[in-house]
Image: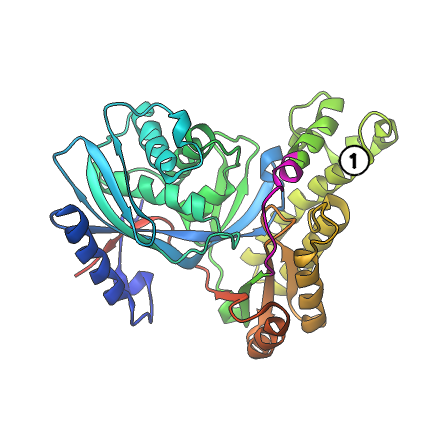
Amino acid sequence: MLQKTVSLEQLYPGNTEVKDRVLKLKEGLEREWGSGEARFFSAPGRSEIGGNHTDHQHGRILACAVDLDMLAAASSTDRNDIRIYSDGFGPFSITLDSLEPVKDDEGTSVAFLRGVADYFKRNGKNVGPFDAYMDSQVPAGASLSSSACLAVLFGEILNGLFNDGECTPTFLALAAKWAENVHYGKPCGLMDQLASATGGFIAVDFYNETDPSVEKIEFDLREHGYALCILNAGGSHANLSDQYAAIPAEMKTVAEYFGKEYLSDVTEEEFYDRIGELRGKVTDRSIMRAMHFLAETQRARLGAEALKADNLRYFLLLANASGYSSESLLENIAPSDENERSLALGIGYAKVILAGKGACRVQGGGFAGTAQAFVPLDFLDEFITRFERLFGKGSVYVLNVRPYGAIEVSVD
């Protein structure tokens, strides 16, 4: 049975400032839109835990929701539009007269809003007018998927206000992906949206992309003595689109050689039996990236099994192996600019600090931005101090895994 609401205390345990945040959003809704009684909705950021660049080949991933979120105060109206005020960015709106993609809106928040509403309508769900005032704790550029979080939040507002909270997390994720692919213009997969919509640790098999197998895993990382840290090594994501696009494109050339559309349809036995045929037919890097996929999709499966068995030691071994494979086979650590090595430097330095404790790996697309580290709690302060010597204050985000995905928040 779907859990439709959660209390403020359950969602933000020990957070003494959240009531002030709620009050600010309520006052903002009244000030900007003059709206009526507010209801509150939250969607979390996410972190990829295993399965680097496997989802677009219909492989497996392991991910989690984190305790940085977007929160909105919303109220239904009798207008024919949806109006959003985003704290720090200002207002935007759409009319409900037409929800078809608008070319000029590509790459904007308006595209997410219209795209989610469009998906709801196309799939027989109710879409209605509302006003909302929102803020975000999910930092842009930290590989916590603020874009997927935003789209999932819009879906959860429509779900709560007009669909009695009956939409499943997978439906919300598919709506967000539709918005990002068709309206926003970004050819992303479904991992980010599923993690934000579902909450907790999730293991996903994308073999059937339109109906992925999603398993939620109960596991408390801190009870096992470790913190999840996101390491922001800086570096620009500008001019990296071609490098991101090359990964799925090159993997597909290998799949096509075997007469398949995706690498998930190629077995390891078949691949390695015929690997000698591939040289000269595809690039060497394509072969390396296929090798990464075939092992990485299995590591994601084994990582999920390790968490379910409370075998953190094996999970950490898999996380380190994932990072090594991304660096040596996938080659998504350093961008082509010979002067840009921030991510490689950050991962290398984190490994020096950890000295065999915990694990460190790239997360997300790679090439620039953030890495992920699992750090023993009794070593956390020292780790942060030493990492910040090189990358500055605030370069380490210490996160908790949030058990709840996108959800309505009950505020007394």
Residue name at image x 39 percent, y 31 percent: 105
- The colour style of the image is rainbow
Residue name at image x 62 percent, y 51 percent: 368
Q: Magenta stretch? A: 233-245
Q: Quadrant of the N terminus?
A: top left
> How would you classify the magenta stretch by its main secondary structure?
loop
Above or below, comparing residue 9 to residue 139 in the picture: below
| Left or right of 137 in this view: 327 | right
Tell me the quarter of the picture where residue 252 sits.
top right
Tell me the quarter of the picture where residue 148 sits.
top left
Q: Nearer the viewer, residue 230 or 237?
A: 237
| Left or right of 201 in this view: 368 | right
Above or below, comparing residue 147 to residue 287 in the picture: below
Q: Is the residue marked by circle 1 packed among few (<14), some (14-19), or many (20+) residues within 10 Å?
A: many
Residue 221 drawn at (x, y percent): 51, 65
Which residue matches tag 1? Answer: 287
Residue name at image x 62 percent, y 71 percent: 387
| Left or right of 400 in this view: 364 | right
Which secondary structure, mark 1?
A: helix
Q: Amino acid at mark 1?
A: Ile
Residue 350 drawn at (x, y percent): 66, 67
Q: Nearer the viewer, residue 4 or 100?
A: 100
User: What count of labels does the image hold?
Assistant: 1
As for residue 44 lying within the magenta part, the answer is: no
Residue 247 drawn at (x, y percent): 67, 37
Residue 356 drawn at (x, y percent): 71, 70
Residue 188 shows up from this direction: yes
Q: Quadrant of the C terminus?
A: bottom left
As for residue 237 lying within the magenta part, the answer is: yes
Residue 165 shows up from this direction: no
